[in-house]
Amino acid sequence: MSGEFPYLRDQDVVEVQRGPEPGGVGGAYRAFGETLRGLKTTMARLIEGPLTIEYPEEKTPVYPRFRGRHKLHKFEDSGLEKCVGCSLCAAACPADCIRVVAAENIPGERVSAGERYAAVYEINLSRCIFCGYCEIACPFDAITMGHDYEMADYDRADLIFTKEMLLAEPIERTPLRAEGE
Amino acid sequence: MLPIADTTMVEATWVMIAKSLVIFGVIFAILPMMTVLERKLIGRFQHRYGPNRVGPFGLLQPLADVGKLLSKEAFRPANAIPTLFVLGPLLPVLSAVLALAIIPWGDVQGGVGFYGIDVPIGVLYFFAVGSIAFYGLLLGGWASGSKYSLLGAMRGAAQLISYEIAMGLALLGVVMMGGSLSLVDIVKAQGEMWFVVPQIVGFLIFMLAGFAETNRTPFDMPEADAELVQGFMTEYGGMRFGSFLLVEYMEILVVSGVAAAMFLGGWMGPGPSFLDPIWMLAKMLGLVLVFIWVRATLPRLRYDQLMSLGWKVLLPLATLNVLVTAVLVVVT
């Protein structure tokens, strides 16, 4: 406490802006009026009703371009996989979470429409940052981002999605936002 | 020894016991529902639902809460004072239950008075018994051996002295108009007009002081969960904490009951006389809703603000109200 004041006492006058002083009959009257106004405000909120979306039962619809879990696609007519195992998605992936091992198509038991197909296609969703670069990089639109965002799991190993899991028709768990909503 | 009860009407002991059990049972059935009601209403006031997971509409929430509290360890800090620490939550419960006895639920019907006991000094009894609750708060806070608890208890003391006088004076006007201290007689005196009309100032002052008496927002400085982590309750856990919580709601009911009896005509209401307790309960619950509404609206005051409000505004207003009432009572 022996130190000097950090400012000169006489010269640096600090002007403090003060609100209305509490107390006194005038203050109480004002406070009473403001209290009534506050009560009106809260009652209006009560009448408006809750805005809560009760999540597990009720979901916020996602936008059409929402980037959720990936999907791999097949041609609808031939049933062949669109993916040709080119690994461009893996190259584009900033999180390095896609692993593609390509293999040659054998005539007679073709898997994909191209020369080669993806023998192994894995996405490690615990590393994926859902940037959508894989979707952009893909020359055949074989991989797209879906709408599913409920991917919590108990084991990290379960978050490595294989080709079969990505190809499978996902359970539609997420409502889609209507046009203009 | 002077009789504290009305000696002109004597009831059998078993009637008294049965009455006590009924009142006790009904109130203790209402208390848990009040906690759900409060949480749900506060939720609605904030655009939320409030608890709705346990049981239908979340009605079993208090059961889950009490079950959880009961399973907790009865912890006591090393530097707490054991006996006083245990006494802390007991005194408020005692005080609230005692105060419950004088709430009038109806007139004498078929030789049975629809009230716990008709004390001729009803209003004084309410104040005497109600103030005991603060001893529990002070003892509990002090005996916890913790800074937060002590601060909460000190705030409680500061609060007590600033609202009690105004509260007493607010009721004095009604006592003068009713010509009696007994709550039953005061309710009977409101046959023509509820005292809330001529005594609106008294009613408002009483309700304001009631918020302070029950440690509710805007006067919940002794608890102050944001700054003092529940103040005097900080060191309490398990059902000791639970009883502090329970007593808050019981005190709300008691204050609402006294306010309903003294200002809102008590059990008076249309319909046959066996509906009287229902009317009383409805009026009490209406006031409870006001308590909740105010809690959802107002922030906590500083305690110097409460003291300046109590001493500079409520006390003069209440005194003026008493003076005017006295003059009017004498003149008319």
Image (cartoon, coloured by chain):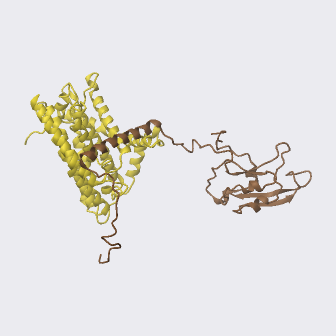
Chain colours: A brown, B yellow
Rendered view: B277 above or below B230: above
Tell me which corner region of the image, top left, top right, bottom left or bottom right, holds residue B13. Answer: top left
Residue B28 locus on image (x, y percent): 32, 40
The quadrant the N terminus of chain A occupies is: bottom left
Q: Residue at (38%, 44%) from the top-left corner?
A: B296
Q: Is residue A173 left or right of residue A22?
A: right
- Outermost residue, top direction? B272
Residue occupying the far bottom of the picture: A2
Residue lying at 25% horizontally and 62% vertically, measured from the top left: B81
Nearer-the-camera pick, B109 or A5: A5
| In the image: residue A107, left or right of residue B111 | right
Q: Quadrant of the C terminus of chain A?
A: top right
Image position, residue A63 (x, y; %): 65, 45
Q: Nearer the viewer, residue A94 or B102?
A: A94
Residue A109 vs B194, above or below: the answer is below
Rendering coords of residue B278 (x, y %): 30, 29
Above or below, B140 against B248 in this view is below
State the residue at coordinates (67%, 51%).
A67
